[in-house]
Amino acid sequence: MSNYHIKHLEEYWQVYRKSLRNPESFWEEIAEEHFLWRKRWDNVLSWDFSKPEVKWFEGAELNITENCIDRHLATRGDKTAILFEPNDPSEGAQHITYNELHERVSKFANVLKSQGIKKGDRVCIYLPMIPELAVSVLACARIGAIHSVVFAGFSATALSTRINDCDCKMVICSDGSFRGNKTIDLKGIVDEALKSCEGVSTVLVAERTKSDIEMKEGRDKWLQPLLDEADSVCKATVVKAEDPLFILYTSGSTGKPKGMVHTTAGYMVYSAYTFKNVFQYREADVYWCTADIGWITGHSYIVYGPLANGATTVMFEGVPSYPDYGRFWEIVEKHKVTQFYTAPTAIRALAKENLEFVNKYDLSSLKVLGTVGEPINEEAWHWYNDNIGKKNSPIVDTWWQTETGGIMISPIPYSTPTIPTYATLPLPGIQPALMDENGKELKGNQVEGRLCIKFPWPSMARTIYGNHERYRDTYFSAYENAYFTGDGALRDAVGYYRITGRVDDVIIVSGHNLGTAPIEDAINEHPAVAESAIVGYPHDIKGNALYGYITLKETGEGRNHDNLSKEINQLITDRIGPIAKLNKIQFASGLPKTRSGKIMRRILRKIACKETSNLGDTSTLLNPEVVNELIEQSLVVS
Ligand code: 7RM
């Protein structure tokens, strides 16, 4: 039996049970056999959720880049580590081998040092999906500097808030970025942001678009000349197991974004372990996660997890619709991608388009399909399974969070039988619990409640940067001795988990707890519907009633809305029951989405409740223009 690589269901159960019986020796064995340590730990785990304080592998010393790069050189030096696929396909892909990655990271790390960056300093990285992004992340880790990657679609205000919150000394950016047929003036956004960031003394600028930009004397420096001069050897800085590796911001429902702090050893062990098992990664595979490194998915499953396993990881600069909607599938065919990991929002967008965009390409290399970020609705799941996987590639519906650092609940492909919309079973080492409103654990199967985790796992965030109290209040105060995820979930008759959405999305209608995901599933079954989102609004009799925002496919446009409403409510009645029927339906031109593709129900709820004077923070929206349209349309909804 191998703890590190699970290959069938029985083995999963054995490993899972072992991880429950003795979590410490379970993780210790994995840490010992699969990683490179400069010094061994004294203590595998100490924890106290009331403080909260969690420490893994205390006393150990290491450098994560030696695990992600150096140790592979002897056996995989000429293997592609990063396969860069540019926005414009005619530019051609770049294969960066482990040897080359080693040299590029070393040089970049020497540049950081020469610019005064030391262990523990915070460095903000604001780059598009170009190789410099992965290289700069690893260069920080090489010298023990803490990276704070800010997704390069965020505005100047969002950027400056994040730079100031953790006192970054340096910003790494590019002149501009390419997205489809657009060129974005990234450096201009940085200049704007830095007007309110006193602490930043250096800006390193990578050349990408060759746009005409301003360079502020004394502050801004072109990266390439510095790299050209830098030494190609950089001894890795040894750090302690619990030294911070990075900060990554995640927006809360209120207040300023939370800088989640991840530490080194536990994060490394867990991201590598889960990558290996959830994607069943094997040596010759070509793995592709379409997320941006600006999100946790990119940190754990484009950079650290794959590289720690010596994998080939694809980095895609562009968008799914450029040059046309076949781009993803063209890339899968061209590079013979074996594992493909994306978000439900991307799947729904592609499912709206002509199937010709899919069927033109040979997708037979695919072995595992993944999804993350939101509950995947049943229709999208089937489209993905039928048309991309040809019913031959298991879909891993992976549930996790920025805070958890790695995948928590997910099928293990070829072991765990999958069911659409179910994230299925906890990974080894993960102890989920469902709680009722009074904080009591719901034992047994066929229960629905709030999802908590009862025992520490190696990659959990250790604090919110500069605000440990907020960390405790947000995650450890709702339930005693448990981490509260903020999500609702149900456990079915066989113990499989289905995530029903954020708890703040749960709507109580006439005393019935309704999760948004199953209702949206029923609506999306209607052939004319592209996407939907359900919120609650106050109702005299029911307490709350349901308000549905629905966008139509092109084929549905121009159809009679009264008839559609009746058909949709009939579908809901058939699938769930009349209790879940919508009281109001708004046929919307679009839904507000975060830049990571999640529907922002908070705004939809305010519109439905006619509380539009204060919509809260909309700075992280991808399509802010849709909000005013929705408000106007809502005035005629009855
Ligand atoms: C990885 C990531 C976290 C929130 C989480 C959930 C939702 C993520 C799934 C999901 C249903 C999934 N980190 N979520 N994955 N819901 N099924 N497979 O997305 O910090 O950006 O978001 O996303 O609500 O709490 S995140």
Image (cartoon, rainbow, N blue to C red):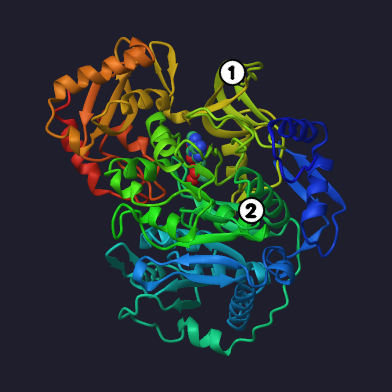
**397 left or right, relative to 325:** right
How far apart in space, not on screen, are marks 1 and 2 (Cα)? 31 Å
Q: Is residue 213 above or below residue 403?
A: below
| Viewer-closest of 181 and 536 | 181
Q: Quadrant of the C terminus?
A: top left
Q: Is residue 568 above or below residue 184?
A: above
Q: Is residue 499 visible?
A: yes
* Callout 1: CB less than 8 Å from ligand 1: no
Locate residue 63, reporting x and y percent: 73, 65
Point 32% across, 13% down: residue:
573
Residue 80's quadrant in the figure?
bottom right
Residue at the limit of the structure toward the bottom, as seen here: 229
Which amino acid is tagged 2? His
Label 1: how many residues lie within 10 Å, few (<14), some (14-19) or many (20+)?
few
The image's mark for residue 438 is 1
Q: Is residue 138 above or below residue 264?
A: below
Disc nearer the start of the sequence (1/2): 2
Locate residue 332, reporting x and y percent: 45, 55
Label 2: how many residues lie within 10 Å, few (<14), some (14-19) or many (20+)?
many
Q: Mark 2 highlights which residue?
A: 262
Point 63% across, 81% down: residue:
110
Which amino acid is tagged 1? Asn
| Viewer-closest of 91 and 459 | 91
**338 left or right, relative to 120:** left
Q: Quadrant of the N terminus?
A: top right
Locate residue 603, reporting x and y percent: 32, 37
**400 left or right, relative to 511:** right
